[in-house]
Image (cartoon, rainbow, N blue to C red):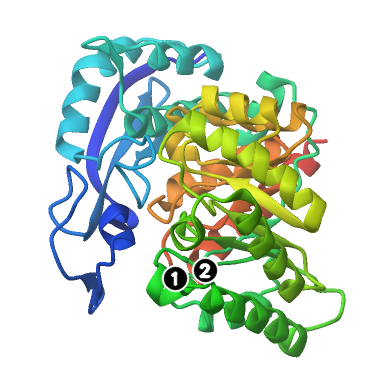
């Protein structure tokens, strides 16, 4: 079996930008593509800044080179997440604490190698989620290359998922170009759409929720007008970044009434609403979501609640899943650190009888997008995010084509 000869790290670029969510929610206004004003979240030098990344190259003694990318999500430093990635500091930490650990290691078990990296402690704390994310991708790729199998086949076999290895539904995100993007998504027959980026009350939600209500109705009408055929019936999924709570307060009944209203406007298409309220901490978020899901079930069973912020780690995913605190659990891949945690989280969500969303970030790269697409297949995720970037076309084709190629190879091998 091949062994690891070396680990090489290269400064790279993320797929989009990192944004100071606290400043945006506080009312920061656009200045061209950026935002005017000073940042509020520690680690930011501007409200919007280019995303950094680190490419981790694992070189085996057979000459194969495997790749993984370290990134942080667009809204780093909030909701319990790690701060913005500093590529040069990440490279230093990998060189000091990961490279010596992996040199000479056999590429016979991804799970064993991933556990080694997860167990590393620096000053009593684990390596950042971004570092563990990128290193583990490279390890998974390296094991797959050593076995001459796809990443999906390695995950399926090591975790005994018994998955069929076929493409899963793709969820595309619009960014701020939320109208033209919907047209593109309909023409491409995207399975779940449009995300919407509803991250500001005044500009996107409306003080009484009227702007989002109008947008949902417009999406419904646009699908009915443009869809290539009547058998195209996508699911609507709107990410609201806690703005519904900012507009209506943390009143379960008021929020549930508003979400049910959105569900009626979306009909005949089912609706998912992500992160309607941010309670400022994990325990408060879990308790509120349990109550909100119960209230929403009584009003509109076709509206599904999606949890994101404050559900960042494998432990968090297991906690929210066990409590039934949402219909859909967003397994936000960069936040969980090593992709071994993503795999375990997706399986835990299914074990709890809930829907597993293999998400991620527009800051993901083409490399991490492909790895996560194969993981989603191997874990039979209910949907997977199209990424990188906010350009839509690029992310959709990268993720869809990767899944199609993987499914074809797996089918040939039986």
What label does residue 329 carry, if any? none
Of the pair 381 and 47, the residue shown nearer to us: 47
- In the image, is 156 to the left or to the right of 30? right
| Circles 2, 1 touching at the beta carbon (< 8 Å) | no
What label does residue 391 carry, if any? 1
Mark 2 vs mark 1: in front = 2
Q: Is residue 392 above or below residue 71?
A: below
Q: Does residue 150 show up?
A: no
Comes first in the chain, label 2 or label 1: 2
Q: Position of residue 156 (x, y in %)?
A: 70, 28
At x 39% / y 74%, what residue is drawn?
A: 202
Q: Residues within 10 Å of mark 1 (few under 14, many from 20)?
A: some
Q: Residues within 10 Å of mark 2 (few under 14, many from 20)?
A: many
At x 52% / y 49%, what residue is drawn?
A: 250
- In the image, is 181 to the left or to the right of 32? right
**Mark 2 residue element:** loop
Residue ranking furthest to the right: 231
Q: CA distance from mark 2 to mark 1?
A: 13 Å
Q: Position of residue 77 (x, y in %)?
A: 29, 41
Of the pair 288 and 238, the residue shown nearer to us: 288
**Count of marks placed on residues:** 2
Residue designated by label 2: 196
At x 38% / y 27%, what residue is drawn?
A: 132
């Amino acid at each position: 079996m091949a062994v690891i000869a070396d680990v090489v790290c290269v400064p790279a670029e993320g797929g989009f930008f990192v944004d100071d969510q606290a400043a945006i929610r506080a009312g920061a206004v656009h200045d061209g593509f950026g935002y005017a004003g000073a940042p509020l979240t520690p680690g930011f030098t501007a409200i919007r800044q280019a995303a950094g990344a680190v490419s981790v190259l694992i070189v085996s003694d057979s000459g194969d080179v495997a790749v993984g990318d370290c990134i942080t999500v667009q809204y780093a430093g909030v909701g319990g997440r790690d701060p913005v990635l500093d590529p040069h500091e990440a490279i230093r930490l990998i060189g000091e604490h990961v490279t010596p650990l992996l040199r000479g290691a056999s590429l016979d078990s991804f799970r064993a190698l991933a556990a080694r990296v997860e167990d590393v402690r620096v000053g009593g704390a684990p390596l950042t989620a971004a570092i563990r994310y990128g290193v583990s991708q490279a390890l998974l790729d390296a094991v797959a290359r050593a076995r001459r199998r796809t990443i999906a086949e390695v995950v399926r076999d090591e975790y005994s998922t018994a998955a069929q290895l076929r493409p899963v539904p793709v969820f595309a995100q619009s960014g701020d170009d939320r109208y033209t993007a919907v047209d593109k998504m309909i023409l491409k027959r995207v399975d779940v759409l449009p995300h919407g980026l509803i991250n500001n009350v005044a500009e996107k939600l409306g003080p009484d929720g009227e702007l989002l209500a109008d947008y949902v109705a417009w999406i419904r009408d646009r699908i009915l007008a443009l869809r290539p055929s009547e058998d195209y019936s996508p699911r609507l999924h709107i990410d609201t970044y806690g703005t519904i709570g900012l507009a209506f307060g943390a009143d379960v009944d008021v929020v549930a009434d508003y979400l049910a209203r959105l569900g009626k406007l979306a009909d005949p298409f089912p609706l998912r609403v992500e992160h309607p309220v941010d309670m400022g901490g994990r325990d408060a978020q879990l308790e509120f979501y349990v109550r909100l899901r119960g209230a929403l079930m009584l009003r509109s069973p076709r509206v599904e609640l999606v949890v994101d912020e404050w559900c960042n780690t494998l432990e968090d995913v297991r906690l929210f899943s066990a409590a039934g605190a949402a219909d859909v659990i967003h397994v936000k891949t960069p936040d969980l650190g090593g992709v071994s945690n993503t795999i375990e989280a997706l399986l835990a969500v299914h074990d709890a009888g809930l829907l597993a969303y293999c998400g991620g970030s527009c800051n993901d790269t083409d490399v991490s997008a492909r790895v996560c697409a194969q993981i989603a297949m191997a874990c039979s995720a209910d949907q997977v995010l199209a990424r990188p970037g906010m350009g839509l076309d690029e992310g959709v084709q990268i993720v869809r084509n990767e899944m199609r190629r993987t499914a074809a190879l797996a089918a040939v091998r039986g």
